[in-house]
Image (cartoon, grey):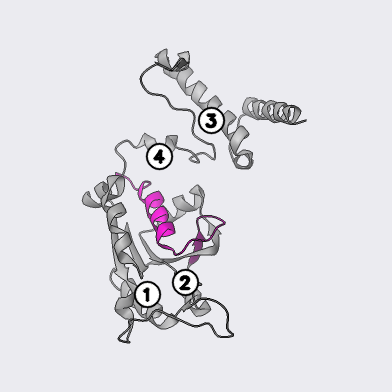
Amino acid sequence: MRIDIISVLPGVFGPMLEASILGRAQARGVIDVVVHDLRDWTEDRHRTTDDYPFGGGPGMVMKPEPVYRALDAVEGLADSRSFVVVMSPQGRPLDQALVRDLARRPRLVVLCGRYEGFDERILKRADLELSIGDYVLTGGELPALVLVDAVCRLQPGALGCSDSVTDESFSEDLLEYPQYTRPACFQQMSVPDVLLSGDHARIAAWRRTESVRRTAERRPDLLNSARLTVEESEFVRRIVEEESVEGE
């Protein structure tokens, strides 16, 4: 998979893209991430990428000309069709289902915003406007890194253990079960006995139950799309009833 990122701050990406899973995945050829400086497609001596908004108002707006030139050039760098993602607080919220969809695409072009946002005509080039949450950041660079990280770890060969992806939170619309490591007892807090039993069937059952419990307690909205058994649905109902009684 190839991901091209277009930004006015290309230097901020290096340390994250070179570290840990992202760095190893690129070294193995699992994913290819290329960062481009939007200012390379400006045509004035100040390398201007923004201008005052028509109609007045605070802040500056990103100009369409350099963005269009950048997209034309970057999309032509590879044969596979690109899917253009514009990072924007007004976009579709990123969730694991969308991550899985984007991870299946051979090529993404990610455009990072700055200032007060984009000239509306830039958005005509977007296949998707994407947000990582209902808050405003100073630019799209951090959201772009979040997207790259989430998409990269779903690529075959990106993680050392393929089971890591299926066991993580949101993989089945459930939060991940509690995890423990050595020592077995720390400050009078002990690891659940079942995890020390060596009985893999019991361990799997415990983990599933705890995933359902944790999701019901912390993110009950996820259960609307989770595939639960009849017994698990009844378990969730009891948890909800207990919480409602406690809240009275």
Task: Please provide percent x and percent y for residue 37.
Answer: 31, 71
For residue 222, above or below residue 5:
above
Q: Label 1 near label 2: C-beta < 8 Å? A: no
Identified at 50% across, 79% down, the residue is: 121
Task: Please provide percent x and percent y for residue 111.
Answer: 41, 68
Q: Which residue type does callout 3 highlight?
A: Ser
Q: What are the residue bounds of the magenta stretch?
A: 128-157
The residue tagged 4 is 165
The quarter of the picture where residue 218 lies is: top right
Q: Which residue type does callout 4 highlight?
A: Val
User: Which of the two discs, 1 and 3, labels the residue nearer the N terminus?
Assistant: 1
Q: Which residue type does callout 1 highlight?
A: Leu
The residue tagged 1 is 71
Identified at 46% across, 20% down, the residue is: 203
User: Which of the two discs, 2 and 4, labels the residue nearer the N terminus?
Assistant: 2
Identified at 28% across, 45% down, the residue is: 20
